[in-house]
Amino acid sequence: MGYSLSSSCLVCGFQSGRSVQVQHCTSLDTDSTKSSGNSASETCAEFRVKYVGAIEKLEFEMSKTLQEPLDLISYIDTAQQDGKLPFMPGEEEMILGVSKYGVKVASLDQCDVLHRHALYLIVRMLCYDDGLGAGKNLLALSTTDTKQQECSIWVYQCGSAEQAQAICKVLSASFDCALASEKS
């Protein structure tokens, strides 16, 4: 088992055979369905993804246990093997929108909002190869509640590693924007 990790990376690329290669969110290809806004303060992009599932209402201490990318990946793998999380997503595509307010997941027609993750409640986001040989990447979002008593893990399937990296890049820009406005 060969692991190669950097503690400062936002995105971890997981390869089958349990060898991990670190990737940083530097892709300029957004592979998004829509991008708008003229400045970093209006960062907004939408991506087509599929929802795999969620592990909700874990004790908050679990988010501290799952700080490292490999720990979070292993936890998701174990949940899939134990039947708590499916291996494959449903057939329905969804729109995952990232903005300075956080992440919103909606139906393709955007009439139904399925999930909302406020930016300040997102603890970690990472992507990795699903290991099933189809070239699909899973995007994992770890979130907490406002009282920091519980945490949840939300898993989405992206069409490619580039798309997953683009989502992380936009989310990173949203964090940068929020931090910059906080300093002002």
Image (tube, rainbow, N blue to C red):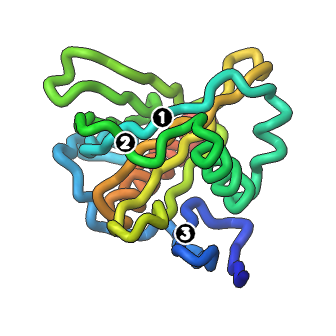
Q: Which of the 4 image quarters holds residue 107?
A: top left
Tell me: residue 141, above or below residue 32.
above
Of residues 70 and 85, the one drawn nearer to the viewer in this rendering: 85
Mark 3 and 2 residues: CB-CB less than 8 Å, in contact? no
Mark 3 closeness class: few <14, some 14–19, many ≥20 residues within 10 Å: many
Estimate the x, y position of residue 169 in percent, counting from the top left. Answer: 43, 56
Quadrant of the image containing the C terminus: top right
Mark 1 and 3 residues: CB-CB less than 8 Å, in contact? no
Mark 2 closeness class: few <14, some 14–19, many ≥20 residues within 10 Å: some
Numbered tag placed on residue 53 in the rendering: 1
Query: Left or right: where does residue 177 sit relative to residue 34?
Result: right
- Could you tell me how far apart the alpha carbons at marks 3 and 2 are, in whole angstroms? 18 Å
Mark 1 is on which residue type? Gly
Instruction: Read off the residue under disc 3.
Output: 14
Residue 184 visible, this orientation: no
Mark 3 is on which residue type? Phe
Query: Left or right: where does residue 128 sit relative to residue 66?
Result: left
Numbered tag placed on residue 17 in the rendering: none
Q: Secondary structure at mark 3?
A: strand
Of residues 80 and 103, the one drawn nearer to the viewer in this rendering: 80
Sequence-wise, which precedes: disc 1 or disc 3? 3
At a point 22% along the width and 51% down the height, the residue shown is 32
Instruction: Read off the residue under disc 2.
Output: 89
At a point 63% along the width and 74% down the height, the residue shown is 18
